[in-house]
Image (cartoon, grey):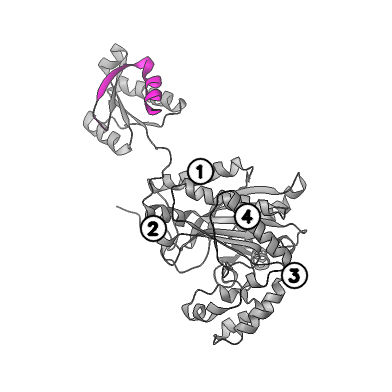
Amino acid sequence: MSSSFQAPKGVSEYVPPRAERFAAIRDAFAERARLAGYGYLELAVFEDTDLFRRGVGESTDVVSKEMYTFEDRGGRSLTLRPEFTATVLRAVLEHNLHRQGGLPVKVWTAGPVFRAERPQQGRYRQFYQLDLEAIGTEDPQVDAETIALAARWYRSLGLTRVRLLLNSLGCKECRPVYRAVLQDFLRGLDLDEATRARVEINPLRVLDDKRPAVREQVADAPLMADHLCAACKEYHDRVRALLADLGVAWEDEPRLVRGLDYYTRTTYEFDHPLLGAQSGVGGGGRYDGLSEDIGGPPLPGIGFGLGLDRTILALEAEGSSFAGKPRCQVFGVALGEAAERRMFTLVDELREAGIAADMAFGGKRLKGAMKDADRSGAAYAVILGERDIAGGEVQLKELATGDQTAVPLTDITSTLTERLSE
């Protein structure tokens, strides 16, 4: 009988065997981040609401429509994090990480983020992200490093259809010129009242509108690429050249703006064509003014957020076999009380040797215990009876073939280590 309680609507949860894939792709990312010199952060799940209002932008859908905001008992307005970058930068500033050594501060984190959206395939109210940031340096090489790290992580998972879409959103020198040109264009369109108001507050948000009626009208909107200043154009060309040097393929997407206000210059998105309307599996960009927006010193930065949920959907769509280490490699079957006691210690010895091992509990007979062994996904069963103990041996059974041999108890750990490494 199941419980009368269920997870709230729109929450993504993972149980075995999908949870093993979830953990494996997160671990694969952690190793790539470590190799590139990024340290791990464990951060607060909720923040002062003003952090996101000032950092992400009042006019964004994230802030205006999608945040889970509440008052605590002291009357303070708090919000479950809808994204990571503002939280990471707040933590870097609060803990003075930018003053503890050379720049950039290179960090990564992972965990759930929350948005009050209408749940659908690939879009959840609680979902999981991997986030990586390099803070304190304005250097095209850092941009290329972070982008390449993400691109190669996708490739290491066996994903072959992920596309990198690349754009530049300019800087505080050239964006105002583009903003004025864009506003003039948008004012001539047949837009609803709310969208017309957005034209005056933040016209870039109109380009990010997903409604077909709006997208059709802005298809011929002027492009930021045609209004970049010389410095931004040179910077963007350098990023592209560095990506080419690293063998990372990209597609220019001059209409890419993304949904957050803090992006400047380099902006990008990873897209997977098999995921339909929710095709974005990750993305990021440069945010050179965000530190000042939230009350910090001038501190340029770049980073990305990668969606674990959509990455798993992409793996399933491509039929990828990527998986983590097996939960169980060897399953112990004991016949009799004395054998159970010895098997209990043998399983512990195998685990200490780095072998994933489990055993049948509850005094099951041979038939029931072997069913458990088959269900476990183990490659081998180790069967131990009273006669085996007396003879100082154990029966080693290969579950895929049914082949069974006797192995001295003193040699079973080394034998399994050798076989599992083949």
The structure residue drawn at horizontal position 41% and vertical position 52%, both measured from the top left corner, is: 315
Asked if the stretch drawn in magenta spans residue 306, the answer is no
Task: Measure the alpha-carbon separation of dots 4 and 1.
Answer: 27 Å
Name the kind of residue labelled 1 in the image: Ala
Lower sequence index among marks 3 and 2: 2
Residue behind mark 4: 241
Q: Which residues are magenta?
A: 400-422
Lower sequence index among marks 3 and 1: 1
Q: Which mark is residue 5?
A: 2
Q: Are marks 3 and 1 in contact (CB under 8 Å)?
A: no
Which image quadrant is residue 82 in? bottom right
The structure residue drawn at horizontal position 35% and vertical position 23%, both measured from the top left corner, is: 343
Which label sits in the foreground, 4 or 1? Answer: 4
Which label sits in the foreground, 2 or 4? Answer: 4
The structure residue drawn at horizontal position 59% and vertical position 49%, both measured from the top left corner, is: 109
Name the kind of residue labelled 2 in the image: Phe
